[in-house]
Amino acid sequence: MVKPLVAGNWKMNGSRIFAEELVGGVLADLSRSVCADIALCPPSIYLPQVCQILTSGNNSIVRLGAQNVGAQDEGAYTGEISPGMLAEFDCHYVLVGHSERRALFGETNQQIADKFQAVQRHKMVPILCIGESLEQREAGITFEVLAEQLAPLFQLPDEVWKQAVIAYEPVWAIGTGKTATPEQAQEVHSWLRDTLRGQVNEIADNVQLLYGGSVKPDNAKLLFAQQDINGFLVGGASLNLQDFLAICRVAD
Ligand code: 13P
């Protein structure tokens, strides 16, 4: 069985006080044993703060994740944060290829593949986000779009999938309150598992496949019951302590 993972992506939300309260609340509640992996991805400026709370809280359950990373190790890249810097602050995961980065900041599949490799060079785990837009779904080209997003990654050695997570986030479900039905999500997740198997054989069976897009406590249960859904990448609901904890419990 694939170990579940629930990751909260705060996006560009929060404050120092928010981070302290939310992370403290998560730790206080999840300090008992949980079977799922749990990750928090605050904005990068709060990574040192959250890192400190997590390490001082005698915590072995909640891991830190970053929302983005520069593809280069160092140099004249104003405004970027290198993978080595994230690793210094105990980041375990890094989101790459979130649809907001693709749509609003023009990230290409190749740039995303470069970031994916940069993250792994520094011994962190990339959470690769992929997903189709509403127009693409309605045009019946969902699987073509996903295959294109995965293509540069499939040029890499098979071993990269031993330390990687994939999050399927249909763009039309992100922040819209319109979740994919469990059947729609499972259809894509089972396609993903099969595609990975075709590419990397049995390594595929251990890759955590997350669903993201308007995940809430009341829809998480049915989604998680699907065979190939191994957890969630949660946006809006991860900003609410009780909602996030409820989703973590579903995956536990
Ligand atoms: P929402 O849960 O707010 O729809 O966001 C999903 C997401 O983009 C997580 O990365």
Image (tube, grey):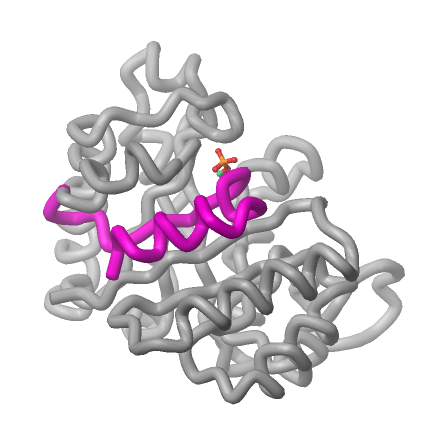
Residue 157 occupies quadrant: bottom left
Name the residue at 19% across, 36% down.
Answer: 222
Residue 43 in the figure: left or right of residue 39: right
Q: Is residue 235 magenta?
A: yes
List x then y, in percent, for residue 211. 33, 43
List x then y, in percent, for residue 147. 32, 39
Q: Where the N terminus falls, by quadrant?
A: bottom left
Instruction: Report the front residue among 226 and 115.
Output: 226
Instruction: Report the front residue among 33 and 161.
Output: 33
Res 119 seen here? yes
Residue 127 in the figure: left or right of residue 57: left
The residue range painted magenta reads: 226-252
Res 148 seen here? no
Name the residue at 70% across, 38% down.
Answer: 105
Name the residue at 49% across, 41% down.
Answer: 237
Q: Where the C terminus falls, by quadrant?
A: bottom left
List x then y, in percent, for residue 183. 16, 28
For residue 113, above or below residue 160: above
Instruction: Report the front residue among 88 and 144.
Output: 88
Residue 68 occupies quadrant: bottom right
Name the residue at 36% across, 49% down.
Answer: 246
List x then y, in percent, for residue 152. 43, 52
Residue 4 occupies quadrant: bottom left
Q: Does the magenta stretch include residue 54?
A: no
Q: Report the number of discs.
A: 0
Residue 194 in the figure: left or right of residue 6: left
